[in-house]
Amino acid sequence: MIIVVKKNQDERQIDNLIRWIKSLGLDVYRSEGENSQIIGLIGDTSKVDIGLIRTLDIVESVTRVQEPYKNANRKFHPQDTVIDVAGHKFGGGHFQFIAGPCSVESEKQIIEVAMAVKKAGATVLRGGAFKPRTSPYSFQGLGLEGLKLLRRAKQETGLPIVTEIMSEEHIDDFYDVDIIQVGARNMQNFDLLKHLGRLKTPILLKRGIAATIEELLMSAEYIMSEGNPNVILCERGIRTYETYTRNTLDISAIPVLKERTHLPVIVDPSHASGISRLVKPLSLAAVGAGSDGLIIEVHNDPIHALCDGAQSLRPDQFADVVNSIDLMLPAVGKVRDK
Ligand code: PEP
Ligand code: MN
């Protein structure tokens, strides 16, 4: 962290500032310029309140030179993290398709979709049991019954499952879920993140609707700093002024994340666009930008889906996306898990 002190300041105030910095266990480096004075902070500045320093009268500006996330930072862990989900690897050049309906609706629906997406190339089944809906009057998911049906689909197909947790109250019910999803709306539910950090289950952490890349990484840090290193990040579109699509897929977040962190990064083109015909082009773009996988909503009867039918692909459309991406993967140096 670098503090620029305004010109002609009272030396006593500067000394006070330096004493306070040193009391935080840090060292300082001072450099006298013609128009200002620079104080460099040496050591772990992650606990320093940058806003507090900024408010001091003698301070011109403060800049962080070190990211506030440590566990997720590629600087301290240059190799890609590879996360094993029932034998399927995320990160490190592996590519995975996660597919399934927005929500589990019935035994017949989830098993039919599971069989179809497996046949088309998915290695993990998605399906919401607890749904975070904008309106309290919309279908809220089948809850524990939905989890039971997901287990049945897993037994039937052998596909590991990913499903969203909304509250730490349900952690025990998620004991055999292969990947626990934290949805966009809960990305900054810090208590939930801390609880999930005490598990070893892989966590699929979706980017918040209005979250910066750094905020996403800080949420990953919450999970990792509690002891769970198995975090998969998901870019799922952010809210912008554009209204044509449900969200705006932030394509540049993919290479930025891959640069900043060693964690696997996947993309959700379904929630990013909200429109099924956009799912394929966004999927191709995500792969081109370096995504380690895709999570796609697939429904056997999208028109009658209880949730997110407009963005859901039919199984044959999903198979077409997989086939096109198979052609791209050699160009980006990735291998699809089968
Ligand atoms: C979902 O995956 O069904 C979902 C609700 O996603 P998000 O949290 O990204 O909106
Ligand atoms: Mn959905």
Image: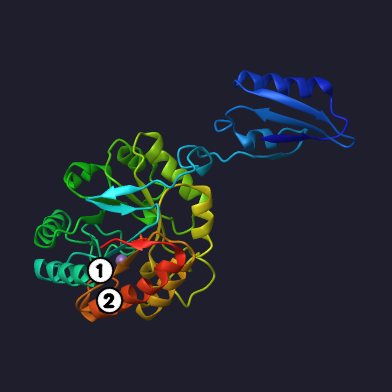
Q: Is residue 183 above or below residue 4?
A: below
Q: Earlier in the sequence, mark 2 or mark 1?
A: 1
Q: Position of residue 267 (x, y in %)?
A: 40, 62
Q: How is the image coloured?
A: rainbow
Q: Quadrant of ligand 2?
A: bottom left
At 44% from the left and 40% from the top, the residue drawn is 221
Task: State the image quarter where residue 41 is shown.
Answer: top right
Q: Position of residue 81 (x, y in %)?
A: 40, 46
State the quadrant of the C terminus. Answer: bottom left
At 36% from the left and 40% from the top, the residue drawn is 229
Asked if ligand 2 lies within 8 A of label 2, the reply is: no
At 42% from the left and 71% from the top, the residue drawn is 328
Q: Residues within 10 Å of mark 2 (few under 14, many from 20)?
A: some
Q: Are marks 2 and 1 in contact (CB under 8 Å)?
A: yes
Task: State the image quarter where residue 333 is shown.
Answer: bottom left
Q: Is residue 205 left or right of residue 44?
A: left
Q: Which residue is mark 2?
A: 319
Q: Is residue 192 left or right of residue 123?
A: right
Is residue 165 in view? no
Q: Amino acid at mark 2?
A: Ala
Q: Which residue is mark 1?
A: 121
Q: Is residue 164 left or right of residue 15?
A: left
Name the mark on residue 221: none
Element at badge 2?
helix
Element at badge 1?
loop
Closer-to-camera residue (47/53): 47
At 22% from the left and 70% from the top, the residue drawn is 117
Q: Position of residue 326 (x, y in %)?
A: 35, 71
